[in-house]
Image: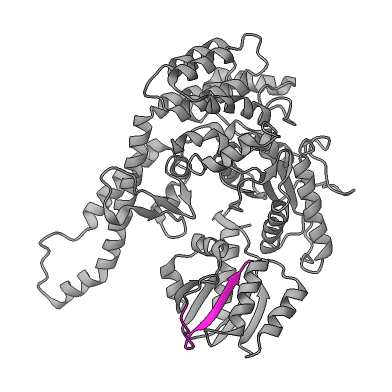
Amino acid sequence: MNVTLAVKQYISKMIESSGPGMKVLLMDKETTSIVSVVYTQSEILQKEVYLFERIDSQNRDNMKHLKAICFLRPSKENVEHLIQELRRPKYSVYFIYFSNVISKSEIKALAEADEQEVVAEVQEYYGDFIAVNPHLFSLNLQGVSRGRSWEPSILPRVTQGLTSVLLALKKCPMIRYQLSSDMSKRLAESIKQIITKEYELFDFRKTEVPPLLLILDRSDDAITPLLNQWTYQAMVHELLGLNNNRIDLSGVPGISKDLREVVLSAENDEFYANNLYLNFGEIGTNIKNLMEDFQKKKPKDKQKLESISDMKAFVDNYPQFKKMSGTVSKHVTVVGELSRLVSERQLMEVSEVEQELACQSDHSSAQQNVRRLLQNPRVSEIDAVRLVMLYALRYEKHSSSILPSLLEELNRKGVSERHRKMIKVVVEYGGKRIRGSDLIAPTDAVAITKQFFKGLKGVENVYAQHQPLLHDTLDQLIKGRLKDSQFPYLGPSSLRDRPQDIIVFIIGGATYEEALTVYNLNRTMPGVRIVLGGTTIHNTKRSTFSKTLKILSCPNFGDRHIYIYIYIYILYIN
């Protein structure tokens, strides 16, 4: 199962179906993101697509020499834009592809608008999601809930996105959901309704073991999104912000004009692909090796070009050197900025305490270390608030909790009352009362023994002690031990064999730490293929003050599906 390959194949089919000749790719805001994540502009140019336009753009010129390939979401707005387009066509012929199921009535409306008979083809290609990595997808949706229930307009969009993943991967799954989450059950039922209604679309070849869709709720593990990460892709997203494979570096001190925005894509950047899941120390070594390799291969300043063959060799190799030069400059800049932020915010010291809070049980040591960092002027407000959030979740019911004292420390540090209230919010969101599983303390003898021996052995990397709850959930699922009482099947049927194809979807967003878990399970579990998705991918760079104020003012403030990334990270805007 490879979501990146699935979307790429869809786009390739669209372009190939239109035949030879110059083309324009007509998209909407969402499909522009879907395409840009899996294809570079230069790759599509090689397929004779010379123009990229938005369907909602009012200033497009008539270009009758171009064929139009339309890749659009089947929204009412897009259908209306397309009807207006067909009434006054700007291109010679239209090949129309919707990213999801479109109704017969809307097809009829398009046919009636096509008075000049310029439409050559209309099809559904199910690429209605962002393929972040081969095993990771996102719907790029924020604010999906209203209190503990779905935002009414969002549930249909999430249903469409998730069913398109199933159709792209050609899977008709059995469904399990998190019982403690009403939103999980609602989504499971909504998916099942679509599968039943569109049964012909889901009539795939039966496999010996049916695929499985597991729907989870972010509130079951509020700790993982709070932790700093130390693998390359996760650090880039956490500290710099990855938006459809692009990083905005315009705020980096002394940045050159050509590096203000860079693209990091594992599909087109060998160094990035090879270092996605390596830790920061290994990345530093590999950057050094990359630079040394470049120094050996680059043309000398006074290279002799004495013969035609010398000149030909130089011209043939120059694009390769230029590409390598761009790769070196990009990654040296990115790693340099990550290193600056780690040092400036003392993230190694902060992360060590975060890991202690998430994984250890020494309350005396934890309170001393948290207090020490809160008193350190170099520790940023966001890191201080996150530390107290982790403490509040970890020692929520501890008889000697010093949470009031830590809140006072935040006050002395200058953290606003509104931000201090976020501590209470995160406990309301993912505290013991809400969780459907034992996130913090193991209760059975086997789990306690495992934790004891882990403590005896020590941990090779103190910054990577934590394993997300998803790891244990998937481990139990694969071994056939995941409790039906906590994760029931939707419907009477259940799996008797070890699952092979598993699609996991987290309402409230996934993290790159969880993506790393899935990557490692795929590597180490023969015969098991896992894909992870979420309503978004968490980091600290996507919060907006207006959304936070909206949440603070809502009567259900404190209900568990208030988005973590909104209220955790609002300090960035100040």
> Could you tell whether 422 is left or right of 486 in the image?
left
Considering only vertical position in the picture, is 285 above or below 418? below
Relative depth, front residue between 474 and 334: 334
**Dividing the image into 4 quarters, which one contains the C terminus?**
top left
Whether residue 501 is visible here, answered yes or no, is no
Residue 331, image x, y percentages: 34, 49
> Could you tell whether 371 is left or right of 187 in the image?
left
Considering only vertical position in the picture, is 349 above or below 115? above
Relative depth, front residue between 151 and 270: 151
Examine the image and state in which quarter residue 412 appears: top left
Relative depth, front residue between 300 and 91: 91
The structure's colour scheme is one colour
Q: Quick one: which residue is furthest to the bottom in this view? A: 116
Residue 456, image x, y percentages: 56, 17
Residue 425, image x, y percentages: 63, 29
Total number of numbered labels?
Answer: 0
Does the magenta segment cover residue 376? no
**Dividing the image into 4 quarters, which one contains the N terminus?**
bottom right
Whether residue 102 is visible here, answered yes or no, is yes
Does the magenta segment cover residue 65? yes
Considering only vertical position in the picture, is 35 above or below 379? below
Considering only vertical position in the picture, is 142 above or below 372? below
Q: Residue at x 47, y 40 (%)?
A: 238
Q: Quick one: which residue is furthest to the right in this view? A: 492
Examine the image and state in which quarter residue 439 appears: top right
Q: Which residues are magenta?
A: 60-73
> Could you tell whether 544 is left or right of 508 in the image?
left
Relative depth, front residue between 501 and 124: 124
Q: Residue at x 37, y 54 (%)?
A: 261
